Amino acid sequence: MQQLPKVLAISLNAWRKDSPRKMQTDLFKYWSKDRLAQIYTKSDLPDTEVCDKFFRISENGVLRSVFNRKPVGEEVENGARADEASQKAIEREKRLYTLAHKKKSWFLTLARELVWSLGKWKTAALDSFVADYDADVYFVPIYSVVYMAKIQAYILKKHPKPYVCFLSDDNYSYKPCGKNPLAYVHRFFLRKRVRELVGGCAEIFCATSFQAKQTDELFGTHAKVLTRGIDYTDKAFKEYEPHKPVKMAYTGNLLIGRTYALCDIAEAMARINRDETQITLDIYTDTPLTGRSERLLNSGGCSVRGAVGKSELERIQEEADILVFAESLKKGYSMKARLSFSTKLTDYFAAGKCIFAVGDREIAPIRHLKDNDAAVIASEKKEILSVLGDLCANPEKINIYAKKAFDCGKNHHESGAMKKIFIEAFINACEKEMA
């Protein structure tokens, strides 16, 4: 294995094999385990094959430290099992995060930032971990929370090394703020931190070409487009006969308004299936549903099935005729997804199935799908009925768009190309430091 730079990642979530957030571990699988370490800020324990050295700053611990003034942060073991009390705390934290994402409260967001500002996370243990590991380069993903940028900035200032940023969402403009004054307050402080991080980085990744162009215009950078890679070594497109009724599947969370998009689809399906069931939708998610959305998504050909594991997910995608990609058409939510690029899309490309995409035409993933003619798209609620009705009436289009989706993945997201972009950025960062 090529001797790659020694990297310290400073990121939010613990790296785990069972996590839906696998992009970072997928990218770092090319590293030797002894040349990679992570600092993260959740209560969870790591369980991954890419790395063995971890430092945890538990958010629960930070909250307690505001009152007891005890330092927070410790090195944790990869693959360790949490005791009963710790496991309950982890599950409680996950439920709170899910609820917070579903019912966004900017007052609570600012309260959370205040907790981190007052918490005792700047510790001798953290400094010792960073100094002893002595990375060649840092990996600094940019998030939508100020406290994470503060942790990153603290380490960069106290233990300076070159660093590589990854900006995968709109964590800078005011567009996601809507009309909420507290959102503008939070974004004001976040923007200051983002400018500092981007201004000092040696290299920066973005998730789409649209976002990379905007980032370069804003900061004078030379951003590289990076997504989760797809291994096409043993993959070939396979034509398939659509089921009767046509089978659709949605896999993933229903946060930032995606529930509304699926409800719009369900309403259209109810009309299509009024006399006879022509199309079905199975929804695999761990996002809790209540009230009208729960009723609507369990009627008219729709069924909520709950979350499943990775191997089961692959089987579900293999058996489906159409895979659904959904972002809310409501402006407040669509602006939050404006520059994001879901790893769900690369999974869908790899599956070689027709993609039905719902989302505002101005958001980056819909632009990408439209530019490459890689999906059938509805960018307004009234289009959903006509698009789905057309697929039911002309099922031959399902295979045509399945091939286009497969080819889009091969042309733009092939793992070898992503690997080259990712590795070269860290090597270049180290070379710039030595120059």
Image: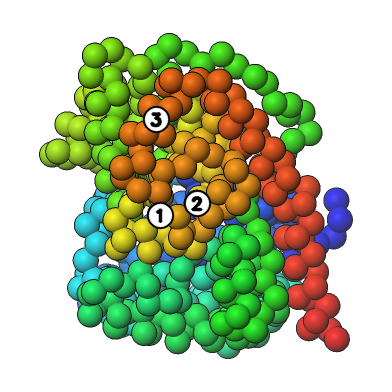
Amino acid type of the residue tagged 3 in the rendering:
Leu
User: On the rendered structure, is 286 left or right of 73?
Assistant: left
Q: In this view, does 220 lie above or below 145?
A: below
**Quarter of the rendering occupied by the C terminus:** bottom right
The local secondary structure at tag 2 comes to helix
Residue on which disc 2 sits: 366
Nearer to us in this view, 121 or 251: 251
Q: Residue at horizontal 26%, vertical 53%?
A: 102
Nearer to us in this view, 338 or 202: 338
**Total numbered circles:** 3
Residue on which disc 3 sits: 388
Amino acid type of the residue tagged 2 in the rendering:
Ile
Residue on which disc 1 sits: 360
Mark carried by residue 380: none
Badge nearest the viewer, 2 or 3: 3
User: On the rendered structure, is 174 left or right of 397?
Assistant: left
Q: In this view, does 47 lie above or below 24?
A: above
